[in-house]
Image: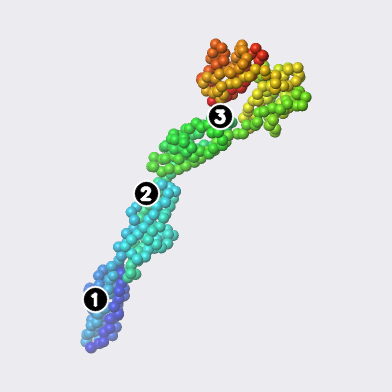
Amino acid sequence: MPTVLASTDETICDGDNVAISASGANSYSWDNSLGTGSSHSVSPNSTTTYTVTGTDGNGCENTDDVTVTVNSLPTVVASSDETICDGDNVTISANGANSYSWDNSLGTGSSHSVSPNTTTTYTVTGTDGNNCENSDEVTITVLESPVVDAGNAISICPDESATLAATGALSYSWDNGLGTGSVQTVTPSSTTTYTVTGTGGNGCTNTDEVTVTVQIVPDNGVTLSTDELTITAVSSGIDYTWVDCNNNFEPVPGETDQSFTHSQSGSFAVIVSNNGCADTSDCIVVDDLSVSSNKINPSITLVPNPTNSITKIVTDAQINKVQVVDFSGKIIEVPQSETKTELDFTNLSRGTYFINIETSYGSYVERVVVM
């Protein structure tokens, strides 16, 4: 009888294939429907023993067998599919094996934090103790975030308001206590950056910010020369306009320098401006071609100042006439009491106004700020 030798036993993972063969005879016949031939590639789905019958030149036969042991694959389970917004991250994971390898350059490990910018499917391959592998996948669907625009930077003068307007989303929420809504009106006391968060129809959010710069208004004080003939604005390096307080604050012709040497009696003030913002000094009374801060005999005080309602003129002089003038010199009609000591600014727009007060001592100008 021929000495028929089948190849050594093999161990494979479910789904793999392996070559089995026989030697020692002239021809061979295999069971399990393999047919004839000295070798075959097999891929059993369970452990199987293959028997080969070999025949020599004398017609004599002998057999041998080879067992292919099949190890089952690990049950690899990736985490469930997720939906995120563009820019967010999410943790994906897998279990059911001893070790794991991910595509999309994630490398090894059972879990990873990912932040795709488009919808992406991640495949994980898990390996068990028998070195058998299986795979699963998880899809991260990425929703587009809104393109939120808070608008261009804004520059304002002190006590002015700015309108903020955001676009690009369905709803909006602002910081700095502004609340919701696409449009907001702000009156910051100093330069402030406002951040708006916009939410799209899919629930995704995005942010943008806008800075409101509050310009610095120069000091509007004035100083006197030693001979009290020249009035000088305290601030330097800005624009100046000297005005006649007794002539509806009309500019004094040709007087646009930091100093003003007067040549006539009257009451004068200086408008100082910087970056489009202006403020006006108190009026200084000029008499007999000299300037004196002591020329104003009566005590005149506005209470309250600033105001947005009724302001009282507190003075020890008798008031004969009161007139309110705006920054352009226009006379403004403001309700006043019979004694002319109370003015009602309730319906006046925000800004700076001047009160011409005629008293028993003469005419004086006071400044009031309406908030």
Residue 338 % position (x, y): 55, 11
Dot 2 falls on a residue whose secondary structure is strand
Q: Is residue 88 above or below residue 352?
A: below
Mark 3 or mark 2, which is nearer the start of the sequence?
2
Residue 139 % position (x, y): 36, 53
Which marked residue is nearer to the observer: mark 2 or mark 3? 3
Residue drawn at point x = 42 percent, y = 59 percent: 106
Dot 1 falls on a residue whose secondary structure is strand
Tag 1–tag 3 contact (CB < 8 Å): no
Closer to the camera, 332 or 307? 307
Can you identify the residue that label 2 sits on? 83
The answer to whether residue 66 of the structure is visible from this angle is yes
Give, as a three-letter code, the residue at label 2.
Answer: Thr
The answer to whether residue 334 of the structure is visible from this angle is no
Give, as a three-letter code, the residue at label 1.
Answer: Thr
* The label number, if any, that marks residue 160 in the structure image: 3
The image quarter in which residue 292 lies: top right
* The label number, if any, that marks residue 49 in the structure image: 1
Question: What kind of colouring is applied to the model shown?
Answer: rainbow
Residue drawn at point x = 28 percent, y = 81 percent: 6
Mark 3 or mark 1, which is nearer the start of the sequence?
1
Q: CA distance from mark 2 to mark 1?
A: 49 Å
